């Protein structure tokens, strides 16, 4: 243990971590930059902060304050000690509705403050798109703004007083009239009054540099305001008094359509006299689906407020009438507004993946598949009335450099966000990045703008500050830094004396040659490094509550640990590939342990703005990690579950297995040997499999008309819930469809000319055989990818004659349907049959909607409660299910989140507490609070098992509910 680490452990109450995992998690923020810290400290209180500063000063080790780690200019990274305020110093100390102020600690997440202020009709004005995970300390450090800054200004406008500890341990309370100013600051300002009065551009989003002009006597000599935006370089914030504003009782959102973003930009300034709360802009390039938006190629999102919905709508409609638009819509419904705002908020991640760019080089191929785009010129700002002209010059410069990027952002404030497809992987590309940055800085300055309009300078732009301010003003910044931090220990290299903007790039440490992997990663050109690079650090996975139907990231919400977030795991994989900090590659225990609590829910595949697919990355890692090594017992007991259950079915020993599982000593031994959590009950096996029921039923034909569908006998339906399969058969047939099961036998043709397959396609006849189709889910989830490939190839062999027909494949278990749709073609990317099978997979609701559009389901007329399956949400979608429930008279919404069982995850030893915590987030409270007689819907076997074991409730598949309706309908008609 180093002397520094030993001293910190002895003196600090909070956590002190110098381990590889803690350091790897903080090497990056949401920028292009990477620095490896010595250690991470989560201070318990202000005394801890003072202690850390004292110890680090004794050792001359730098200190970097970090909030949510969503900074885009590199200022939340450092080579010394990183202070993590999100663990302990994250409280709302007090809130006073009368004075409209709140006292907050730096690690408090903005949304928690908003939730506390809302019952009083108040809110904190600034609201960045990262509001669900950014912290107040980070917002003060960056002087963050957000979409409502046209109404409520920047964070600096909302700060009253700040408690700060200087690098030399002095405790200061910053405020107006020089309150809390360190010795020498007033003298410095008094000697430079003329420069401070003339050297700063006047615009609403000037964030670059130090706000020394706030110290002018005519501006109240506001030391607290001047501290905002200093990026942790002047002192360490320990507490803040912030101002709250009155929230409108009602809001309306007008979405205005324009031909392109330049037209939208030119119109934005003209809307400001109408007093909008927001004027946000974005172009069609960033919108996956414009279904909710009016006609146009770019849009302004203009929000208005009022005492009533009618007043807010009237103001929005007045803006629509005044605007010269090609399309518009006004929304007052809160759910509709949230859906539209999600489009805008996700742009920060969506902008990192550009549309097809063509080309044949490795870089061009990655662009063609959804090219990578990066920050660096994420948030420059110009006066609002210059925005249209600036955008034209900006576009021209992009074209001249052969680059692409789609602007969006705070058009009413003249602040533009854009991610650009810089080549940051090659030496020539990095040189081009530098040239473009220098030229664009000159364009911004020519329009009277600021290099940063929201996210700060950090390393990305600090080198270019002389272009904006001149060398004399930058030297004044250096002198101010010296007054506050004479030893240059606080976040050195930011704002003053910066490192060059093209050094410390996080991509430089990644391997240049492709990594040998099992999955195909088609969206990333087959490059695992590119897949890992998808995570840009916007940290949507770090939200502390799942909003609406969202799933990502249940393990983080259960533990609160960064290493159990999607971003944290991606960072560890990045460091694994880099090989500098995590040195043992696929054998890394740090990566293994972080992935251990990944539920493989696939929520990140849909909820992450850049579609990071951690479930696939986990399977890939486990495949390599255990290659040629002893696997955990759970991989054998649950990973090979289809084999064990098939053996039980063939020997007809299900009653014996159930009887033994009911005897506590036998169950204890089985769970211990199988790596199963002792708290779990072993699910009962069906006495008769679904296939055996089908074979017996097929002897008595029930009809031969209608389109043919193949009903997939997944492992869970086959051996554990055959009632689901039986119900599905009856409903599909009632809808006029013919049902068959997939083939089960192969043999060589008589001529010996290779393997041939014969299958009875008659729905009432099935050839008995020993081989069964399987989606390979349990092998994939445990990383047994060689076995998964073998199983899936056998399945494709069996299904080959079916693939030559038009018959769709209906899969009842959502996780199995998702495996066939996504894992199958990505794992067998070299087999064209895989894509053909994946493309014909339908869920139960999809099959009824597409194949029996004129069928009317029975009216059940019941309320429903439950949870949409994670894989359904992430891969399959649930819109057909919603429509089917509505047609059947099943009212109510299913909750989001994750049930927590997640296949084998919740059964594995050591996962029980996290599994229960995930269930307690949404689904268990929803079920407990359901009205009497409500139907508990759970299409997934895992979801049903979790509900049964934790709540004593029987969940049912939608097919089971509908078949009951059919029976009741027949009874009433009889």
Image (tube, grey):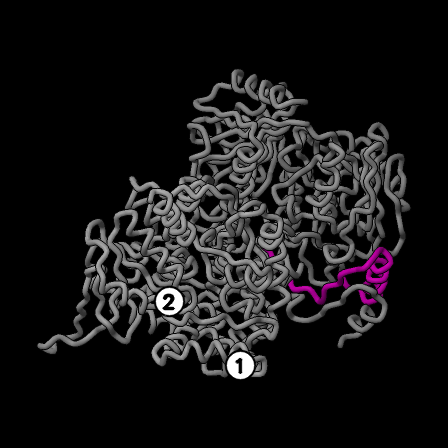
Q: Which residue is mark 1?
A: 670
Q: Which mark is residue 299?
A: none
Instruction: Residue at 74% x, 39% y: name it.
Output: 473
- Residue 586 lies in the magenta-colored region: no
Q: Give residue 814's position: percent from left, percent from top.
A: 42, 57
* Image position of 203 (left or right of 804): right
Q: Which residue is mark 2?
A: 718
* Image position of 624 (left or right of 706): right
- Residue 36 lies in the magenta-colored region: yes
Which quadrant holds the N terminus?
bottom right
Instruction: Residue at 49% x, 78% y: name it.
Output: 659
791 or 893, which is in the foreground? 893
Q: Give residue 117's position: percent from left, percent from top.
A: 74, 38
Instruction: Residue at 37% x, 54% y: name it.
Output: 365
Which quadrant holds the C terminus?
top left
327 or 856, which is in the foreground? 856
Would you say residue 554 is visible in this rendering? Answer: yes
60 or 137, which is in the foreground? 137
Q: Give residue 71's position: percent from left, percent from top.
A: 64, 49
- Residue 45, located in which quarter of the rendered image? bottom right
Would you say residue 520 is visible in this rendering? Answer: no
Q: Secondary structure at mark 1?
A: helix
Number of residues whose C-alpha sits closer than 10 Å to that of mark 2, classed few (under 14), some (14–19) or many (20 or more): many
659 or 384, which is in the foreground? 659
Q: Give residue 41's position: percent from left, percent from top.
A: 75, 63
- Residue 33, located in which quarter of the rendered image? bottom right
Q: Secondary structure at mark 2?
A: helix
Query: Could you tell me how far apart the alpha carbons at marks 1 and 2 are, in whole angstroms?
Result: 22 Å
Number of residues whose C-alpha sits closer than 10 Å to that of mark 1, classed few (under 14), some (14–19) or many (20 or more): some
Instruction: Residue at 46% x, 34% y: name it.
Output: 292
- Count all numbered tags in the image, as a single digit: 2
Highlighted range, magenta: 33-62
């Amino acid at each position: 243990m180093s002397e520094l680490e030993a001293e910190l452990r002895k003196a600090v109450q909070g956590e002190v971590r110098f381990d590889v995992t803690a350091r790897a998690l903080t090497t990056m923020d949401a920028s292009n930059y990477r620095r490896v810290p010595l250690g991470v400290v989560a201070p318990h209180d202000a005394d801890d902060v003072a202690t850390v500063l004292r110890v680090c000063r004794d050792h001359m080790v730098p200190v970097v304050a970090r909030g949510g780690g969503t900074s885009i200019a590199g200022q939340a990274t450092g080579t010394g000690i990183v202070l993590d305020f999100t663990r302990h110093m994250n409280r709302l100390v007090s809130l006073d509705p009368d004075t409209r102020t709140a006292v907050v600690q730096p690690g408090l997440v903005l949304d928690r403050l908003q939730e506390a202020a809302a019952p009083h009709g108040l809110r904190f004005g600034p609201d960045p798109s990262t509001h669900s995970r950014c912290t107040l300390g980070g917002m003060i450090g960056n002087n963050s703004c957000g979409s409502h800054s046209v109404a409520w200004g920047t964070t600096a406008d909302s700060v009253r007083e700040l408690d700060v500890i200087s690098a030399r341990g002095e405790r200061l309370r910053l405020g107006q009239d020089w309150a809390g100013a360190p010795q020498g600051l007033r003298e410095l300002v008094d000697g430079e009054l003329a420069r401070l009065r003339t050297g700063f551009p006047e615009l609403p989003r000037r964030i670059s540099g130090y706000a020394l002009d706030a110290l002018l006597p005519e501006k109240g000599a506001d030391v607290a305001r001047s501290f905002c935006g200093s990026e942790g370089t002047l002192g360490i914030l320990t507490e803040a008094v912030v101002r709250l504003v009155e929230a409108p009782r009602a809001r309306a959102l007008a979405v205005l359509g324009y031909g392109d973003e330049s037209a939208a930009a030119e119109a934005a300034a003209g809307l400001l006299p109408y007093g909008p709360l927001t004027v946000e802009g974005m172009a069609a390039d960033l919108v996956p689906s414009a279904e909710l938006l009016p006609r146009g190629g770019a849009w302004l999102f203009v929000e208005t407020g009022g005492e009533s919905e009618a007043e807010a709508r009237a103001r929005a409609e007045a803006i629509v009438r005044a605007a010269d638009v090609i399309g518009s819509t006004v929304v007052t419904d809160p759910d509709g507004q949230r859906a539209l705002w999600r489009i805008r908020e996700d742009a920060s991640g969506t902008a990192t993946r550009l549309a097809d760019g063509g080309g044949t080089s490795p870089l061009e191929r990655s662009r063609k598949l959804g090219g990578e785009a990066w920050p660096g010129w994420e948030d420059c700002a110009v006066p609002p009335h210059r925005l249209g002209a600036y955008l034209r010059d900006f576009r021209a410069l992009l074209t001249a450099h052969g680059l692409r990027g789609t602007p969006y952002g705070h058009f009413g404030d003249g602040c533009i966000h854009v991610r650009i497809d810089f080549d940051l992987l090659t030496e020539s590309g990095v040189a081009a990045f530098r040239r473009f940055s220098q030229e664009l800085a000159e364009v911004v300055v020519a329009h009277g703008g600021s290099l940063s309009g929201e996210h700060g300078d950090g390393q990305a732009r600090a080198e270019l500050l002389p272009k904006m301010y001149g060398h004399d003003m930058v030297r004044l910044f250096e002198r101010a830094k010296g007054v506050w931090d004479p030893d240059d220990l606080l976040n050195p290299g930011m704002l003053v004396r910066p490192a060059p903007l093209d050094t410390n790039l996080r991509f430089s440490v990644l391997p240049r040659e492709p990594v040998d992997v099992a999955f195909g990663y088609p969206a990333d050109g087959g490059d695992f490094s590119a897949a890992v690079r998808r995570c840009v650090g916007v940290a949507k996975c770090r939200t502390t509550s799942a909003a609406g139907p969202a799933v990502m990231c249940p393990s983080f919400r259960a533990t609160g640990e960064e290493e159990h977030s999607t971003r944290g795991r991606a960072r560890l994989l990045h460091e694994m590939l880099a090989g500098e900090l995590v040195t043992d590659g696929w054998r890394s225990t740090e990566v293994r342990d972080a992935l251990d609590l990944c539920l493989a829910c696939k929520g990140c595949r849909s909820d992450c703005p850049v579609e990071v697919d951690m479930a696939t990355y986990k399977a890939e890692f486990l495949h390599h990690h255990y290659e040629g090594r002893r696997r955990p017992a759970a991989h054998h007991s649950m990973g090979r579950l289809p084999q064990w259950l098939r053996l039980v079915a063939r020997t007809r020993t299900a009653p014996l297995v159930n009887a033994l599982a009911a005897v506590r000593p036998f169950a204890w031994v089985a769970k211990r040997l199988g790596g199963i959590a002792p708290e779990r009950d072993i699910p009962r096996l069906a006495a008769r499999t679904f296939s055996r029921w089908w074979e017996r039923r097929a002897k008595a034909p029930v009809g031969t008309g209608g389109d043919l569908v193949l009903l997939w006998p997944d492992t869970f339906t086959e051996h554990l819930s055959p009632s689901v399969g039986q119900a599905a058969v009856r409903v599909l047939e009632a809808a006029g469809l013919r049902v068959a099961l997939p083939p089960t036998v192969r043999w060589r043709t008589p001529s010996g000319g290779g393997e041939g397959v014969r299958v009875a396609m008659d729905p009432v006849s099935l050839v008995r055989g020993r081989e069964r189709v399987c989606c390979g889910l349990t092998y994939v989830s445990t990383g047994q990818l060689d076995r998964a490939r073998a199983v899936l190839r056998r399945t494709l062999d069996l299904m080959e004659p079916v693939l030559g027909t038009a018959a769709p494949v209906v899969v009842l278990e959502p996780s199995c349907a998702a495996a066939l749709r996504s894992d199958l073609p990505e794992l067998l990317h070299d087999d064209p049959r895989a894509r053909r099978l994946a493309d014909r997979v339908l869920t139960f609701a999809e099959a009824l909607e597409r194949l029996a559009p004129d069928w009317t389901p029975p009216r059940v007329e019941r309320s429903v409660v439950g949870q949409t399956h994670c894989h359904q949400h992430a891969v399959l979608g649930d819109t057909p299910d919603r429509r089917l429930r509505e047609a059947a008279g099943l009212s109510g919404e299913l909750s989001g989140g994750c049930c927590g069982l997640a296949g084998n995850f919740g059964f594995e030893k050591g996962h029980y507490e996290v599994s229960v915590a995930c269930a307690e987030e949404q689904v268990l409270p929803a079920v407990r609070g359901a009205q009497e007689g409500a139907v508990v819907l759970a299409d997934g076997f895992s979801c049903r098992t979790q509900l049964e074991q934790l709540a004593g409730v029987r969940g049912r598949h939608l097919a089971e509910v509908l078949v009951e309706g059919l029976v009741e309908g027949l009874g009433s008609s009889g």
